[in-house]
Amino acid sequence: MSDEIAAALATGPWALIGVAVLVFADSFLVIVPGEVAVTAAGALAVSTGAPALPAVIVVAGTAAFCGDALCYLVGRRVGIRRWRWMRHPRVAAAFAWAGARLDARIASTVFVARFIPFARLAVNLTAGATRVSAPRFLGVAAGAALAWSAYQAVIGAVVAAVLPGGPVVAIVVSVAVALLIGLGLDRVLARRARRRA
């Protein structure tokens, strides 16, 4: 990908729509690179001037919230046992973990889970299945989605602002930085969970 192609993609009408679609799909299909799309859009916002950084944050946050709300609704309507993949021991353990956390601390659980792909899915489905109050869940989920989108976009924007080399370099480096931060957070959270156990 050249800098000209990156700039054309950023200024085209589909940039924000593409981000929204990827982020929405990432809410329930953890293999979709929603985080990468937001970080790349944040880098493009600074390196090319388009799309606007506030627009990236709002669009990504709205799409993330809509995806989380859909997962909550699926959990409420379908539950967490209906399909075979839901009864796999690891998945069932994730649902049990989410249920215990939601009982103790709903706000912090929903907020933190938004930043961890599979935890996000488990928490949102479990919140619906265990009949967590919809207004309470949706309020926390909205705040978490906006914070998540701002975090992802700002990582890309900061890297693009301090790194010379054009949009492609900014995208590649900002995505690598975001992935490293995510891996670091996963390790810290895993260590804390082991200590508590």
Image: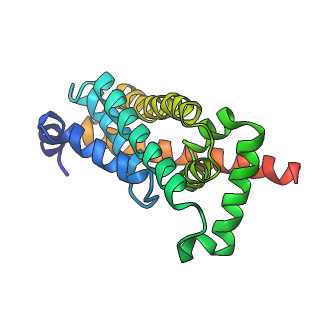
Question: Could you tell me residue 138's position as x and y percent?
Answer: 51, 34
Vertical placement of residue 53 versus 31, above or below: above
**How many numbered tags mark residues here?**
0
Residue sitting at x 11%, y 39%: 8
Residue sitting at x 14%, y 33%: 11
**Left or right of residue 166, residue 27 in this image:** right
Residue sitting at x 45%, y 29%: 146
Question: Could you tell me residue 121's position as x and y percent?
Answer: 54, 54
- Give residue 35's quadrant in the image: top left
Residue sitting at x 31%, y 32%: 59
- Give residue 62's quadrant in the image: top left
Give the colour scheme shown. rainbow
Question: Could you tell me residue 42's position as x and y percent?
Answer: 34, 33
Question: Could you tell me residue 188's position as x and y percent?
Answer: 72, 45
- Give residue 93's quadrant in the image: bottom right
Vertical placement of residue 85 versus 180, above or below: below
Q: Quadrant of the C terminus?
A: bottom right
Vertical placement of residue 21 versus 165, above or below: below
**Left or right of residue 83, residue 126 in this image:** right
